[in-house]
Amino acid sequence: MAGAPARAYGDFFSRLRWRRAVLPAFEREVTTSAPADAAFTGADLWIVVLELAALPVGSWHGRAPERGRAAVPVLVSSWNADQTASQTIRELESSGGCAGEAGSCPPVLLFRAADFRPSPGESAAQLLARVESSASTLSDLFAFAPGDPSSAERPELSSRIPSSARRLLDAGCGSGATSAAIRARIPGLAVTGLEIDPTAAKRAQARIGRVLVGDAGELLVSLAAAGERFDAFLFGDVLEHTADPVAVLAAARHAATPGATLVASVPNVAHLSVVRDLLVGRFDPAPAGLEDAGHLRWFTRDFLTQCLEEAGWAVDRIEGTEGAAPPDAEAFRRFFSGWPAAEADSALRSLGVYQWIAVARAA
């Protein structure tokens, strides 16, 4: 189904993976308002991808629902049966993921044209609503669909905002759950959210009140020029999506009160899963995670330190969070046993870090 007019960079990779899994005779992009009789003509079996953030797991070629019924895939998580977690597409392909529920909003629908003939004047959206209402789960068909991490509090970030804060700037607030939790913990805290996605910004506004829609760097410059000042800043997995993270952090510094606190998290490009993918010649942009297609910059601990210091922030501490272990992690760690001791120790520590979390203050 057609999305926004400006196609996101990562959509191209998702479309390619669907082509390879489905091997379609032809493909068509359809808008929800299109007449259903024109949209769904020319094929006997339709596989409709409603959300390009969903990815096929395994081969879908030749798969079809029962006659008279529609089908949805089983959604898999990145968790595997052995309680490890697939962090990249290659790892997910290798493990197959761990089966979960079909979900209330399936990202993909399968149906036969003969079973769902369009009614006069019916739109594509209306036909697909009928299809979904009769769909059952095809137990051996799998898809991975990442959720929205900003819809739930991230306590590893919220706990680092000091209780003395009075004005919090949440850059890239997403749906706003983390800053809403901080506001609930700190009475009287005023929160300003910045979010480039209007849909997420609308959800955040219901949670935290003031949300400005646009590029975080540009908005920070405007806020500073208007004389607004904040004593706490939150950058939860935002800097890697910016073309110039130093400039964005410097803009925040100009809007900071003396001694203001900044908390920032970034994914670790030196994580075991990424390093292992590179060693076997793989790097697959994904809808989310360590190899997110939206990442413009890639961070190690040292690079994060450099960006903060260059932007005028004094780093108090940078800590690594491990997250779930990827498959066969220990076997890969033994790969480093022949390195010089100092390098091996540093590499092993970095391999286990999923993301770096920095706490800094306005110098």
Image: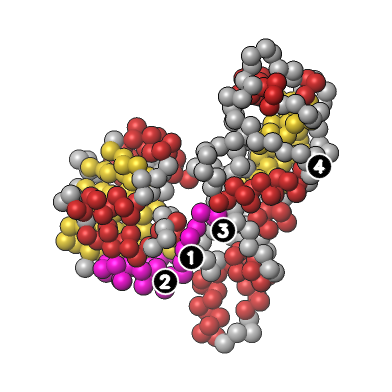
Residue for badge 2: 303
Q: Residue placed at 36% from the left, 69% from the top?
A: 307
Element marked by disc 1:
loop
Distance CA(mark 2)–CA(mark 1): 9 Å
Q: Nearer the observer, disc 2 or disc 4? A: 4
Q: Residue placed at 61% from the left, 42% from the top?
A: 52
Instruction: Mark 3 and mark 1 in contact? Answer it, CB < 8 Å.
Output: no
Residue for badge 1: 298
Instruction: Report whether residue 158 is seen.
Output: no
Viewed as shown, does residue 286 lie left or right of 307? right
Residue 126 in picture, x, y percent from top left: 62, 20
Label 2 environment density (alpha carbons within 10 Å; few <14, some 14–19, many ≥20): few
Marks 4 and 3, the one that precedes in the sequence: 4
Question: What is the magenta range?
Answer: 292-320
Label 4 environment density (alpha carbons within 10 Å; few <14, some 14–19, many ≥20): few
Instruction: Mark 2 and mark 4 in contact? Answer it, CB < 8 Å.
Output: no
Q: Does residue 222 sit above or below 70 in this rendering?
A: below
Q: Give, as a three-letter code, the residue at label 1.
A: Trp
Distance CA(mark 4)–CA(mark 1): 35 Å
Marks 2 and 4, the one that precedes in the sequence: 4
- Residue 61 is marked as 4
In the rendered view of the protein, which quadrant contains the N terminus?
A: top right
Determine if the magenta segment contains residue 300: yes
Distance CA(mark 3)–CA(mark 2): 17 Å
Instruction: Mark 2 and mark 1 in contact? Answer it, CB < 8 Å.
Output: yes
Marks 4 and 1, the one that precedes in the sequence: 4
Determine if the magenta segment contains residue 65: no
Element marked by disc 2:
helix
Q: Give, as a three-letter code, the residue at label 3.
A: Glu
Viewed as shown, does residue 185 lie left or right of 299? left
Distance CA(mark 2)–CA(mark 4): 44 Å
